[in-house]
Image: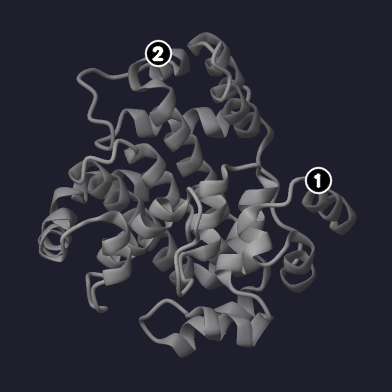
Amino acid sequence: VVRAISRRAGREGSRALSAGAGDLLDVVRKVGALPPMPRAAARALELLDDPDAHAERLGKIIETDPSLAAAVLRLVNSAFFALPQPVASIPQAVVMIGFARLRTLILATLTAGLRDLVPPSAADARDRVWEHSISSALAARSLAVEFGFGWGEEAFAAGLLHDCGRLVLLAQRTQAYVGVFERAGRSLPSCVEERAAFGVDHAAVGAALLTLWHQAPALVESAGLHHAAEFPASDAAPYIAIVVVSDWVARSVTAPIPTLAAERLGVPLDLLDRLALELPPRLAASRAALLSL
């Protein structure tokens, strides 16, 4: 596994990893093997990048994985999408929700799959990470829509995946990471606490995983750099900024308002402060639907 990941890292180095988020080989040595992306999901995401892709072919790929197909149908018929009529088949689901939201849905099922790798002994920590990821994703998409950015689905994906490294750590270093959670109290563990325990933090682990999964640089950098002191001079900076802001909203705005991120997005602080209070109740039904994945 280490040799394979090392070769891949050499071929496909990511800006986020080269900027200091860590590298695949180092993460694997400190954490353990990173979970591969399920084959059907990988094929579906690859096809979604093809301008000639069509719903029937995508549906057939998804149907080869019964668990993925069931999750797609369950979620597409939930309050998350609020469609006017029930959807009975995968190809119909693809047509109804469109390719952009299908990508969102597949990434949601992949994140739920990471959650399911965590042993029951870490259930409390696992559930806190999952709930925070869902809340961040919904806040990110809603904020992107409110601010008129036009990339709400991409914002959702960035918010959903930004803490995926925590789920990997809980799956691979369960007992030790549960101890880090316990010492952190009701807060999620900080990168400093994680590096003290493992020599690597969840941001680096998440960036490594998303690199291994061939995800877009914006998603890799959002996971790897959302705790960085400065925003990088790259196209990913707005995505990182909205992850920082949505992370703050998902924490019930108990921390100081992230002024640098708001400034990077060009968002007035009073508007952000108001939306932070209004969004959680508005998103309750969608949050419940995603939490049930």
Q: Which residue is mark 2?
A: 92
Residue in the picture at 80% in, 48% down: 8
Q: Amino acid at mark 1?
A: Arg
Q: CA distance from mark 1 to mark 2?
A: 38 Å
Farthest residue, direction right: 3
Percent position of residue 234, x then y: 51, 53
Q: Which residue is mark 1?
A: 11
Position of 259 relative to 72 (above/below)? below
Residue 124 marker? none
Image side of residue 215 versus residue 275, left or right: right
The answer to whether residue 121 is visible is yes
Percent position of residue 62, x then y: 56, 24
Percent position of residue 88, x then y: 38, 16
Residue in the picture at 31% in, 28% down: 77
Q: Looking at the figure, which quarter contains the C terminus?
A: top left
Position of 94 relative to 283 (above/below)? above
How crowded is the residue under tag 1: few (<14 C-alpha within 10 Å), some, or many (20+)?
few
Count of numbered tags: 2
Q: Amino acid at mark 2?
A: Gln
The reply to whether dot 1 and dot 2 touch (C-beta < 8 Å) is no
Percent position of residue 258, x then y: 29, 71
Residue in the picture at 23% in, 41% down: 145
Under circle 1, the secondary element is: helix
